[in-house]
Structure formats: C-alpha cells, structure tokens
Amino acid sequence: MIDQLPGEPVSSATHCGFVALIGAPNVGKSTLVNALVGSKVTIVSRKVQTTRALIRGIVVENNAQIILVDTPGIFAPKRRLDRAMVSTAWSGAHDADLVCVLLDAREGLDEEAEAIFAKLANVAHDKILVINKIDLLLREKLLALAKAANDRIAFKQTFMISALSGNGVDDLRRTLAAMVPPGPFHYPEDQMSDAPIRQLAAEITREKIFQKLHQELPYRSTVETDGWTERKDKSVRIEQTIFVERESQRKIVLGKGGATIKSIGADARKEIAEIIEQPVHLFLFVKVRENWGEDPDRYREMGLDFPTE
C-alpha cells in the first residue's frame, strides 16, 4: 500500500452496505437505530415485539452510507404473526453485509440469547457484538459477559453502549462506516429511512397504542394510513384506521366517552407534526377486521411473508 503524499486530495471513493441488528425482543434495537440515525425512524416501546417488518434507517458517516435494518426481536414463536416476524428477522441477517448482535447487559446470555447464538453459526457475514444498557451493570460483569459471548462466536469487534444515552454510539457508527463494502450510495444523502412517510405515521400511531394500552390488544391491532392531504395553509390532513379483531377490542381502543382514542390521537399528532415539520390534523377511526392476523394481504402490507404452516 502506498502512503498518500502531502497535498494529495483525499479519496472520494464511497462505501455502502446493509447492517442488520439482531437480538431478542426489547434489547434496544429500535432505540439504537434511532440513535445512529439521529432521528426517529422506527417505533420504540417498553413492550416486546413492537417491530414487525424490516425498517431501514439510513446513516451517512464520512464517505460511507450505512443502511440499518431493524429486525423484529427473535423469540419462540407461538402464532402465525410471530413466525412471520422471526422469519423476517433471520432473512434480514442473511441478506445484510454485516450483522450487529445486540445483548441486554442485564439479561446476559439468557435462554433467548443462547438460541440466537446457536443459529448465528449459519450466518456467513462478519458479526459485531453490541452489549447495550451498560449503565445498568458493573464493569467487571460487563467484561465477563463480553468474554463469554466471544468464546461462543467469532465476533470481529465488541462494543459496549447505552443506546438511550448515546454512550458509545459514535464509536460504533464510525466502525460500521469503515466496515461496509465499497460501492455507490443507495439513497440520497439527506434521506433517513426508506419507509414511506405514510407508513412511519402509521407506525407512530401504533406506538401510541402500545403506550396507552396493555395485555394482548396491541399485538392484535394494526394501523393503516388511508388519507394524506396537503392543505393550502401548509398543514396536512391525515386519516388513519386502527384495525382490531373483535368489537370488545374496539371499545377498549375508543375508551369511555372516546377518551382513549383522543389521547392516542393527540400524542400521535404531536409527534408526526414534529417529524414532518408541518401542522397536522389527525383523524383516527377504529374498525373491526376479524382474523386480520390470518389474512395474507395484511402481512404483505407490513412487509412480512405469510407463513403457510
């Protein structure tokens, strides 16, 4: 390799690659995607299994474009939707150029992590270990966890981060930029996600449902953006439908006197307006769509393959 001579221009060759984030539910993948991008591109919730389809966050670091694939959390599937989400997660890992394996520092190599590690042997790409939520564990335990994980899998590098506070995220971003392969950018430099804004708006509303409600209902609901109208006063009128499977669920979403749906709508409207930097008029409707979890068309709309078994 010949050293660059003084005064020579820096190489303008670009790099671009897909990086899949793999891990158990609730290890912080969505939070990390948003932290690396520097803006919200995927929903975050304390409830597990909130990410259903592959949502790509796009990062430009120096001369590299990193396309982050936020996969659904990998867990033991029980329903058809669960199987579709897990299958999507593994397909994201196999299709990417690099794989970031996230561990929750508190949970360590628990049963879910062990199951993921067992299947990682079939993924041929370089793997990076990312231990998240490090502010919740002593350094000695973090080092022991890193050693145990590296004894199991040949990781190229190990990072200890807090996606929530941003600690260690910049170092990870620079390393990913250095590791993605040479090639032209796939997206414009100022684009932060390949998810259409209508889809992101629907995801934000779904996030608010997760935050307001509990038990099984959020997993039995889906949101679709039906209308998006730019008005003369520079505001946007958005119409969305929340689909549930039973009339009893519709009543829960509406709440007494419509209080719950109003609260969901107010929170969603505020966040959508901040992202698109325009005033938003959000109109939410709740409808019953029986057995939508068994409808192949709904899976395609969410970017998931419909499991036949």
Image (cartoon, helix red, strand yellow):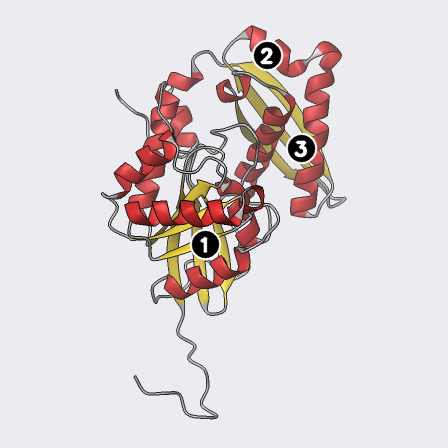
CA separation, marks 1 and 3?
34 Å
Cα–Cα gap, marks 3 and 2: 18 Å
Q: Position of residue 287 (x, y in %)?
A: 56, 15
Classify mark 2: helix, strand or loop: helix
Task: Tell me where residue 95 appears, x and y as whole percent.
Answer: 30, 47
Other-residue count near label 3 (Cα within 10 Å), few / some / many at <14 / 14–19 / ≥20: many
Quadrant of res 247: top right
Q: Which residue is mark 2?
A: 250
Q: What is the quadrant of the C terminus in the image? A: top left
Q: Which residue is mark 1?
A: 159
Residue labelled with disc 3: 268
The spot of residue 77 in percent (x, y) is 35, 23
Q: SS class of the residue under badge 3?
A: helix
* Res 194 seen here: no
Q: Is residue 8 above or below residue 60?
A: below
Name the residue: 51% across, 40% down: 28
- Crowd band around label 1 with a 10 angstrom C-alpha radius: few (<14), some (14–19), many (20+): some
Disc 1 is placed on an element classified as strand
The answer to whether residue 303 is above or below residue 290 is below
